[in-house]
Image: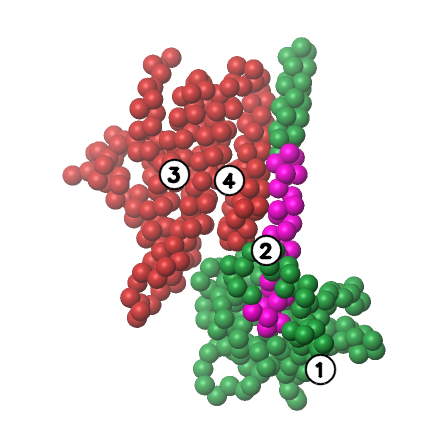
Chain colours: A red, B green
Amino acid sequence: MPKPLSGSQIVLQGLWNDNPVLRQILGICSTLAVTNLLVNTLVMNAGLVFTVTMSSLTVSILRNYTPMRIRMMAQTLIIASYVIIVDIAIGAYLPDISEALGPYVGLIITNCIVMGRCEAFAMKNRPWASFLDGLAMSLGYAAVLLIIAVIREPLGFGTLLGYRIMPEGFTPWTIMIMAPGAFFTLGLFAWFVRAKFPQTAEEKKQGH
Amino acid sequence: MKKRFYSIVFMFVLTFFFAALVSAVKVHNEERIQTNQQVKLKRIVLKVLGVSVDEKAPNREVIQIFEKRVKPIEVKQQTLYVGYSEDGRSVTGYAFPVGGAGFWGPVYGMVSVDPEASRILGIAFYRHSETPGLGARITEPWFTKQFAGLPVFPVEGDKKIFYLKPAGPGKRPNELDAITGATGTSRAVETFVNRDLDRFLRETWKQVKKG
């Protein structure tokens, strides 16, 4: 049994060393889908942070009572419940954004980060540590999405949070709005981070 | 055996708890969600009928204006929104829903015609899942404004009421600008708006004229 991580170690893991998007390459589907408008990204992030944190906490509290054989079923139920609550809340208070996000809020259920953290961390750790881990991991995801959205929205629409920031004559890059634009942005960004700040032995070997 | 029984009880209790939680949240917000959707529809009806409503106007105000200027009627199982002038004496137009399969998913819109059902007054799309910046531009004013004043019958020799063609000179009056880069969405809009307008004229409008 490895020594349990301290609080600050858990936070650092989630935000940087083991960042779900850049290092683990998880949750890419939604990363690509919701980052063409910053406002959508913000709402999606809030939904994901809530879901991951609450799911991790709940799974951790129940970990000693959950029979091993049905743990996946139990986790899915817990995650799905929180996601539906987020979906209802957005529909009630932010109807326009709810429509813009379309199915992606519901698809948080299948976001690998949520179940990944429940399985990899919350099943084996105390509630407080699991809560921190969920929070840090989801914030790590949120931070990457924000950076990508801040690149995509100005180039794709010429705006940021709906306000025009590019000069009048700027021609929006249509590709930045579509999925390929997200692939390019995310790919370049992950490459940059991994080359500049290598983590794994393989990355270090390839570095200069 | 005991283990299995425990698993079933555990899952049952867990499901019961979370189902109750989700239901409670749903019931608590049901009314607000419904109001949001209804007000959204009312705004769209007012918009296509040419009644200007401030975008930031609260829901209550929108409902008030709607009740004063619009009367929904049922004609052949289709809802027809009759628009009235400010003093409520004369009919300014009829609005009805249009919709069909878009490029990615269903597209819902609202069209209005003048009291003689001879020309289109306005069109708006309010729910769709088209690509932002491409197909989603069907909601932009430059696109929807083209429809205003369009005759609601095919010009002699044409099969459709209107066509969406690539932007450019030398076009006939019933050839509107399609969206560059969103051929799929443009084609879909051309198909279902034509179809629904045609259906309106053949079925709903005949019934309205009969009284």
Pointer 1 with pointer 4, Cβ within 8 A: no
Q: Position of residue B50 (x, y in %)?
A: 59, 73
Dominant SS type (magenta):
helix
Q: Quadrant of the N terminus of chain B?
A: top right
For the residues carrying marks 1 and 2, which lies nearer the camera in this image? 2
Q: Residues within 10 Å of mark 2 (few under 14, many from 20)?
A: some
Q: Residues within 10 Å of mark 3 (few under 14, many from 20)?
A: many
Asked whether residue A29 is in view, the answer is no
Marks 4 and 3 belong to one chain: yes
B187 lies left or right of A26: right
Asked whether residue A38 is in view, the answer is yes
Type of amino acid at the residue the image marks with label 1? Glu
Q: Residues within 10 Å of mark 4 (few under 14, many from 20)?
A: many
Q: Which residue is mark 3?
A: A141
Type of amino acid at the residue the image marks with label 2? Asn
Mark earlier in primary sequence (4, 3): 4
Q: Quadrant of residue A127?
A: top left
For the residues carrying marks 2 and 4, which lies nearer the camera in this image? 2
**C-alpha span from label 2 to label 4:** 30 Å
- The residue depicted at 64 percent of the width and 87 percent of the height is B155
Q: Which residue is mark 2?
A: B59
Type of amino acid at the residue the image marks with label 3? Tyr
Q: Which residue is mark 1?
A: B116
Helix, strand or loop status at disc 1: loop
Q: Is residue B56 above or below residue A22?
A: below
To which chain does the residue with label 1 belong?
B
For the residues carrying marks 2 and 3, which lies nearer the camera in this image? 2
Q: Which residues are magenta?
A: B23-52
